[in-house]
Image (cartoon, grey):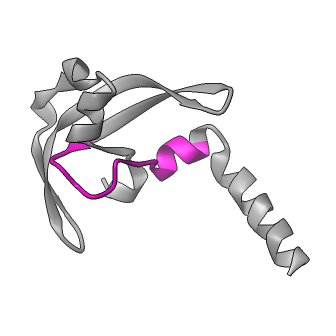
Amino acid sequence: MNKSNQSLVNSTFAEKCGLMHLLDKRWTGIAKGVGSAKILGRIHIATLQIGNMFLPCSFTVLEDQSIDVLLGLDMLKRHQVFFIFFLLFYFIFILF
């Protein structure tokens, strides 16, 4: 599966959020793309709070990376966040 379809979390950030006890280590491996990173496992379900919304989300946990959290297209589509972003971009484009 393409990693842009999956939500990713940095292992250090997952530790700070207290999520590492949920880590399923059967999903270990190497993520390859422009670079590569070690996959430590997968958190199958965690609650993500964005503003006043609480959304269930699964994460692939990567060994220390520069980005703490990257929301994948699967999660964005499931909760229709992508479409809201598109409309916001459209309105910003109209204004300028």
Q: Residue at x 67, y 43 (%)?
A: 80
Front one among 14 and 41:
14
x and y percentages locating residue 54 in the rendered image = 59, 24
Rendered location of residue 46, percent (x, y): 41, 23
Q: Indicate whether 53 appears above or below 86.
A: above
Q: Residue at x 68, y 26 (%)?
A: 52
- At x 79% / y 60%, what residue is drawn? 87
Most extreme residue toward the bottom is: 96
Residue 41 location (% of width, % of height): 17, 35
Q: Position of residue 11 (x, y in %)?
A: 21, 39
Name the residue furthest right.
95
- Residues 67 and 35: in front is 67
Number of numbered discs overlaid on the protein picture: 0
Is 70 left or right of 56, judged from the image as shown? left
Residue 32 highlighted magenta (yes or no): no
Left or right of 41? Residue 92 is: right
Could you tell whether 21 is left or right of 58 in the image?
A: left
48 or 5: nearer the eye?
48
Q: Is residue 88 above or below residue 64?
A: below
Q: In the picture, residue 49 is in which quadrant?
A: top right
Region of the chain picked out in magenta, as a range: 61-77
Q: Residue furthest top?
A: 21
Where on the picture, by quarter, is residue 50? top right
Q: Residue at x 81, y 76 (%)?
A: 93
Q: Hey, which residue is sitting farthest front in the picture?
A: 16
Q: Is residue 78 above or below residue 53?
A: below
Pick the quarter of the image with the C terminus: bottom right
Answer left or right for 4 relative to 25. right
Query: Magenta includes 62?
Result: yes
* Picture quadrant of residue 92: bottom right
